[in-house]
Amino acid sequence: MKVSTMAEMMAAGTKPEVLFWVGCAGSFDQRAQKITKAFATILDKAGVVYAILGKEEACTGDPARRAGNEFIFQMMAYQNIQVMNAYEIKKIVTTCPHCFNTLKNEYPALGGNYDVIHHTQFLQELIEHGKIKISDSNEWKGKTITYHDSCYLGRANDIYEAPRKVLESLDVELKEMRRCKSKGLCCGAGGAQMFKEEEKGTSRVNMERADEAIETKADFVASACPFCNTMMTDGIKNRDEEVKTEVLDIAEIIAKAIQ
Amino acid sequence: MEFISGIVFSILSVIAFYIFAKKLLTIKRNIHLGRPIELNDQPIARWKNVFLLALGQKKMFRNIPVALLHLILYVGFIIINTELLEIIIDGIFGTHRFFKPFLGSLYPILINSFEVLALLVFVACLLFLSRRNITRVKRLISNDLTGWPKTDANLILAIEIVLMGLFLLMNAADPTANFIISSWIKPSLSTLDAHQLHTIEQTAWWMHILGIYAFMNYLPYSKHLHIVLAFPNAYYASLEPKGKMHNMVAVQNEVLYAMQPELAPTNAAPPEKFGAKDVMDLSWKNLMDAYSCTECGRCSAACPANSTGKLLSPRKIMMDTRDRLEIVGKNIDANGQFVDDGKSLLNDHITIEELRACTTCNACVEECPVSISPMDIIIELRRSLIMEDSNAPSEWNGMFSNIENNFAPWKFAPDDRDAWTKQS
């Protein structure tokens, strides 16, 4: 697909409405790349003029900072802010709640001030403003979906409604897990856990959460974070060999439902 | 006789309040051993938190039945203690029910409502005791509480039961009084003569007030101190989004000066210590958190690491911080200033394995009814581990070097970052 970079836009003398911050998972992880492409497809269909940083994008530094390595975090933040300020970036949308949290809450203190929104909020806006139309005969209609709250959207930033509103627009039945919203159980990936083996315990966090998702007997699990997606997919695979409940990002679900 | 007892009572009161105030000042000093941080902005939002979280107990109502039982204790404590004013005045001046003539018909209404509350408190404490010892609610029997903390919790409930009992017995033994609950006890005292009744009333009165003074002085050594500190702790609670981590300006500047050496001051001070190894490296708010913790364990019950059997327990993080701070405080009391004892919060109290298991999900922070952030302490200790001790699991070291060299936590070529645009 044709996706412009900021460098190309600059060379052509144009500016995007919004920068799509893809994030490392969205850029490199094979599963997350599908989420990235689904969201880019939606942006195209909605006629949004957007750009990516492409090769100029770098890790926000979130996992390093949460592991305790402030030096690496500050180095990445410095580099990213230099790049974005040079392009005079005003608005950013991202499909990763960890990038979202860092860009929105932690870059301002370092000189990076942007209007940052998460893709579920962006999707909600697109639907509310009629920029994208959900098909009446969309393939999710009548299905039951359970939404897994990402900690970095939910508790970290109090975003509980946007993802649910987007899903509700599909005419599906939303079934909440035992622990949801501010009580939602983590998938186990945050705080740089994604990048190391779990400590010794009686169970794994993602399996505990997978059990709660399976309990709802929903047809699909909706996620809004590439890391949650990986953890939930692995957890369900380990717990539920028969049913194979699929874990899909809200962007993927919407991409398949619009006219 | 009444004159002497008034003097004895006054002296005891002064001693009780003096010891209490002195201990509170020691705790204040201990809290201020922490790093300075400014938490005085947005006073309106802060007062709102005091009203909603501390006075209104908003977080408690995430579990309504327990919240209601707790509310009884809380309202009972505040309202019954207004009666304390009369008890103290009677004690000093040898009067009997000092407010009665002033309040007229309002007086029995007030005392009756105190008695109803006292009975409710009595029952609520019994139910809380049974939750800890008979039905054994999981978070209340965890290993965190083995030993003194478990005794502390049971002791508080037992003391409250005894105090309420004494209050009711005192009214029951008063022949001039006839109140709603204590009148139930009156029949069992009917065989006693006036002198015996007077002795019982006086004894109950003395034990009640001395019990309250003893309980007050027990607070600073107990988890029950939350009844005082919940209020300032709510006022100073973070107003930032929970996902935002505290910025390390020293490191920010190090990186800035490395990238733009022309900005570096010539007389730059040596960098501060990175992260926290001991309680003095934490902020004073972290330390106030530790003294505010009432060890209810809602944090650990919600913690994904704890509920999957990992060593990490956010409640234990807070208890360890308070224990270590008490040791440091006693060290200062004994030596005039802190003399290195070769120990620290990190390693001697909180182990690396506990710290590593945190997913930074903020569930502990969300659950805490008294605005504590165990996660903040975990992160400061992690910073010390990584930046002072270079102590990281090998996978994390790999992740760090990938970010540094390939700008992503995995080992992919940075040039492939936009490769997804070329896939079908």
Image (cartoon, coloured by chain):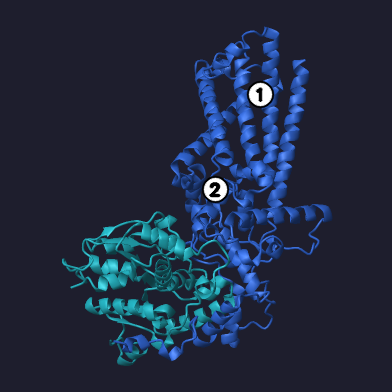
* Residue at the image point whose x is 32% and y is 89% from the top: B422
Q: CA distance from mark 1 to mark 2?
A: 44 Å
Seen from the viewer's position, the closer of residues B409 and A216 is A216
Return the x and y of residue A221 as percentages of the image width and height.
Answer: 34, 65
Circle on res. B275 = none
Residue B121 lies, with reference to residue A59, above or below; the image says: above
The picture's colour for chain A is cyan
**Which residue type does callout 1 highlight?**
Ile
The picture's colour for chain B is blue
Return the x and y of residue B413 as percentages of the image width and height.
Answer: 46, 90
Q: Is residue A65 visible?
A: yes
Q: Quadrant of residue B91?
A: top right
Mark 1, secondary structure of its residue: helix
Seen from the viewer's position, the closer of residues B100 and A227 is A227
Q: Are marks 1 and 2 in contact (CB under 8 Å)?
A: no
Q: Residue furthest front?
A: A242
**Which residue type does callout 2 highlight?**
Lys
Circle on res. B138 = 2
Task: Look at discs 1 and 2 and give the one toward the viewer.
Answer: 2
Seen from the viewer's position, the closer of residues B142 and B177 is B142
Q: Earlier in the sequence, mark 1 or mark 2?
A: 1
Mark 2: few, some, or many residues within 10 Å (few <14, many ≥20)?
few
* Residue at the image point whose x is 21% and y is 63% from the top: A141
Q: Chain of mark 2?
A: B
Return the x and y of residue B188 as percentages of the image width and height.
Answer: 60, 13
* Residue at the image point whose x is 37% and y is 89% from the top: A7
* Residue at the image point whose x is 49% and y is 44% from the top: B57
Mark 2, secondary structure of its residue: helix
Q: Is residue A25 left or right of residue A36?
A: right
Q: Which residue is mark 1?
A: B89
